[in-house]
């Protein structure tokens, strides 16, 4: 990502995104990360940071609307709870905005003038770089959409290519996000659909796993064995495609022998409308 190109996309506001002499240098392996909002996605990201060894639990801070619930969740992970956004910002080098989209203005209002030069990573759907510029003019931010597999460092983090981070902040943010899985830069116009595909698909894939496991149980395989049998098959197939870049159709063909069992199963799935069902699911979200 080229930071100067990103700011140019905003109409040249701010001119050159060169590193300020006053900018504090923070390394990713020593950065203190603060979550404003600590729901499922924030928890998944925190788990991924800790599991990767990139950010120790003791260097992760969180604040949320329900402080008592936050304490239980945070302390179970070794994360440090904070009562409000002001104390969280004071404790953190990098701020992650992880509240519900409609809560963003309210959550950031108390700290709008206290963010200074700290990089802000947003995971709130629908909050683009341009929208943050209106809410927090002059701040350094990037909009992203991670998915839940970041908890095991196998996620994908979709990043809006337009952002207002400095070059140094961008390196720090990218290093943190890459510890969670794959980082993919996306044009602003495609953020919605890219976030839908990567963010919602884990639910659809989980349904596929559950369905195939049910079929396994139907034919006598214990459920405790059915789930790992199916899940590893899904994981292995996905890794094979990523490793080789093979077209999924070719991968399917490679398993389908003429007159064999797999092609009969494929025909049944086609008759049931598997492909159109997935496309309709995305249509229902985007429509």
Image: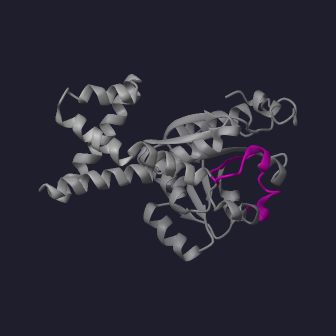
Identify which residue is drawn at 82% across, 30% down: 8
Is residue 109 shown to the viewer in this render? yes
Dividing the picture into quadrants, the one containing residue 162 is top right
Viewer-proximal residue, 150 or 214?
Answer: 214
Please say which color scheme the image uses.
one colour
Instruction: Residue at 62%, 37% (x, y): give it.
Output: 172
Residue furthest toward the front?
271
Q: Residue visible at 63% across and 33% down?
A: 171
Magenta span: 108-131
**From this viewpoint, is residue 29 visible?**
no
Q: Give the farthest residue toward the bottom.
A: 68
Residue 142: within the magenta?
A: no
Counting from the top left corner in percent of width and height, residue 145 is at 59, 47
From the top left corner, tell me how far across and down residue 52 is, in percent: 44, 43
**Drawn side of residue 36 relative to residue 272, left or right:** right
Q: In front here: 85 or 216? A: 216
Task: Locate the N terminus by quadrant.
Answer: top right
Q: Residue at x 69, y 33 (%)?
A: 168
Q: Is residue 276 left or right of residue 184?
A: left
The total of numbered circles placed on residues is: 0
Residue most extreme to the left: 220
Nearer to the camera, 277 or 179: 277
Where residue 271 appears, as percent x and y from the top left, is: 33, 44
Expressed as whole percent of the image width and height from the top left, the position of residue 26 reads 65, 40
Q: Is residue 71 left or right of residue 217?
A: right
């Amino acid at each position: 990502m080229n930071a100067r190109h990103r700011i140019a996309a905003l109409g040249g506001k701010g001119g050159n995104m060169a590193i300020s002499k006053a900018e504090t240098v923070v390394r990713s392996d020593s950065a203190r990360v603060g979550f404003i909002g600590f729901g499922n996605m924030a928890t998944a990201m925190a788990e991924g940071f800790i599991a990767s060894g990139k950010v120790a639990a003791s260097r992760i801070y969180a604040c949320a609307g329900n402080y008592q619930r936050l304490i239980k969740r945070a302390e179970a992970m070794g994360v440090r709870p904070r009562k409000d956004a002001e104390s969280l910002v004071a404790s953190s080098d990098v701020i992650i905005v992880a509240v519900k989209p409609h809560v963003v203005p309210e959550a950031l209002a108390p700290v709008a003038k206290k963010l200074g030069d700290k990089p802000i990573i947003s995971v709130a759907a629908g909050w683009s770089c341009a929208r943050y510029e209106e809410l927090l003019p002059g701040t350094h931010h990037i909009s992203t959409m991670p998915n839940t597999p970041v908890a095991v460092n196998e996620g994908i983090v979709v990043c809006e290519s337009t952002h207002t981070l400095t070059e140094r902040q961008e390196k720090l943010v990218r290093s943190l996000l890459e510890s969670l899985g794959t980082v993919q830069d996306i044009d602003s116009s495609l953020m919605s659909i890219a976030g839908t595909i990567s963010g919602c698909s884990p639910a659809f894939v989980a349904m596929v796993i559950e369905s195939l496991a049910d079929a396994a149980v139907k034919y006598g395989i214990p459920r405790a064995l059915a789930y790992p049998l199916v899940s590893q098959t899904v994981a292995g197939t996905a890794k094979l495609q990523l490793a080789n870049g093979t077209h999924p159709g070719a991968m399917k063909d490679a398993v389908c022998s003429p007159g064999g069992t797999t092609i009969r199963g494929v025909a049944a799935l086609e008759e049931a409308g598997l492909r159109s069902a997935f496309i309709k699911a995305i249509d229902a979200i985007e429509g």
